[in-house]
Image: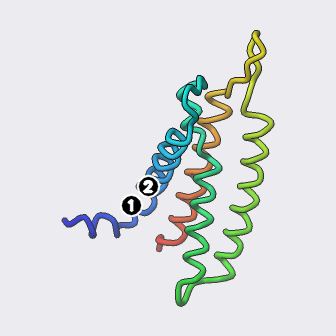
Amino acid sequence: MSLGNVLATPQFRIWGIPIIFVLVGAYAKRLGRRDGDSSPWWDNWAVATSTLLMTVGTIVADIQRQGAKSNELVAWLVGVLFLVFVSVEHERFRSWRVDGSGAVIRKPVVGVLIPNLVSVVIFMAYQAAKVGP
C-alpha cells in the first residue's frame, strides 16, 4: 500500500489528521517560546484553539470545493467559530492558577488536556461526517 493510498483512507482522515494538527500546533508553540521561558513543558501542548482554527481552515477549503454541501458546511463553520471563541475565553480566564508565590501556572488537565481532547473530537466528528457513508 502506497503512502498516497494511506493518506486517502477515511481512517487516516478521521484519526490521523487531528493528531497531526495537535503535533504541528505543539511544535509551533514550542518554537514560539521566548528564550529563558520558565513555563512548564505542558504549556507547549495547549493547542486547542490552534487545532480549532486549523479545523476552520479545513471547513473553508471544503466550502470552496465544487459540489460541496454548502449549507451543512456553513453550519459547521459557524459552530466551530463559536467554539474558537469559547476556547479563547477558556484559555484566558479558566486554564490558569496562581501558586503560593504569585506565579501564574497553567492547569495541566483543565487548561491543556480537556480542551485538546474537545478540539480533536470536534475535528474527528467533522471529518467523519465529511468522509463517512
Residue 112: give x, y in percent of width and height: 61, 35
Residue at the spot 47% in from the left edge and 74% down from the top edge: 133
What is the quadrant of residue 107 in the picture? top right
Between residues 130 and 48, which one lies in front from this camera angle?
48
Give SS at disc 1: helix
Q: Which amino acid does label 2 sit on?
A: Trp
Identify the residue at the far left of this view: 1
Residue at the spot 76% in from the left edge and 59% down from the top edge: 82
Residue at the spot 79% in from the left edge and 45% down from the top edge: 89
Q: In this view, does 104 lie above or below 75?
A: above
What is the quadrant of residue 83 in the picture? bottom right
Q: Residue 15 carries which label?
A: 2
Q: Decide: few, some or many residues near mark 1? Use Cα within 10 Å; few <14, some 14-19, many ≥20.
A: some
Q: In this view, does 129 lie above or below 38?
A: below
Give SS at disc 2: helix
Q: Decide: few, some or many residues near mark 2? Use Cα within 10 Å; few <14, some 14-19, many ≥20.
A: some
